[in-house]
Amino acid sequence: MVEIAGRTVTYGQFYDEMLRWVEYLRDLGIEPRQRIASFLPASIDSQLLWLAASCLGAYEVNVNPELRGEMLRHVLTDSDAVRCFARPDNAAVIKGSGIDMEVTVVPRGASFVSNWPATPLDQLPSPSDVSCVIYTSGTTGPSKGAVIRWAQFSAFSVAHHERGSGPTTPCMHRCPCSM
């Protein structure tokens, strides 16, 4: 079972829903090497979006949902994302910030991709493929995007786990699913 932010699914349900997200992203026209922004809080939906994008060869840009104003505009503009995924309240923040970007509203609760097929994947990402793009905090200047490959992410997750950390240890919002 996977539980994040009050929503619980089995690993089988999680995998099937991720496959549905892959088809949903394909229908939106998301292509390999395109960047999509996730302005979602830590949630099962944010995990599904990240993994589905990676399975398509697209790059998920994880945007802190607390960002506002110039910092938000900088990250979304600098990332060159073609679309942003956000909860309804944060979709309004993006639209109100003057950024010209397609925004997909991801409602809370049950899956909104249930009408898409769970088509099996032909191939999984390789260790050298991009896992995601994470922006720095910007304490010494404008935030910079750091490209994280699957091999790096895997090594980080293993090291984090071996040090006795667990799902409740604050780290990256993705680590609990990888443990």
Image: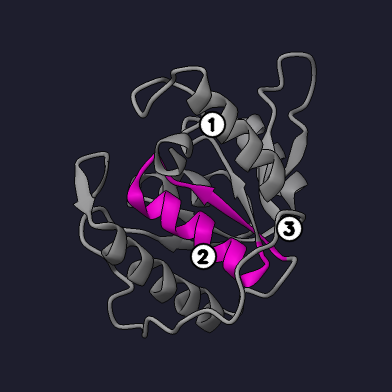
At horizontal 58% and vertical 82% (from top left) the residue drawn is 122
- x then y, percent, for residue 163: 51, 17
Assign a secondary structure to mark 1.
loop
Residue at mark 1: 67
Which corner quadrant of the image does residue 137 belong to? top right
Q: Nearer the viewer, residue 170 or 115?
A: 170
Q: Identify the magenta region.
A: 34-58
Q: Earlier in the sequence, mark 2 or mark 3?
A: 2
Quadrant where the C terminus sits is: top left
Crowd rating for badge 2 (residues with CA inside 10 Å; few <14, some 14–19, many 20+):
many
Query: Does residue 5 show up?
Result: yes
Foreground mark, 3 or 1? 3
Residue matched to label 2: 52
Q: Residues within 10 Å of mark 3 (few under 14, many from 20)?
A: some
Which residue is at the front of the view, 160 or 64? 160
User: At 43% from the left edge and 50% from the top edge, which residue is drawn?
Assistant: 46
Figure check: 105 above or below 140: below
**In-front residue for pair 47/37:** 47
Could you give the CA–CA distance between mark 2 and mark 1, rounded to whole angstroms? 24 Å
Which one is in front in this view, the residue at disc 2 or the one at disc 3?
3
Q: Amino acid at mark 2?
A: Ala
Q: Earlier in the sequence, mark 2 or mark 1?
A: 2
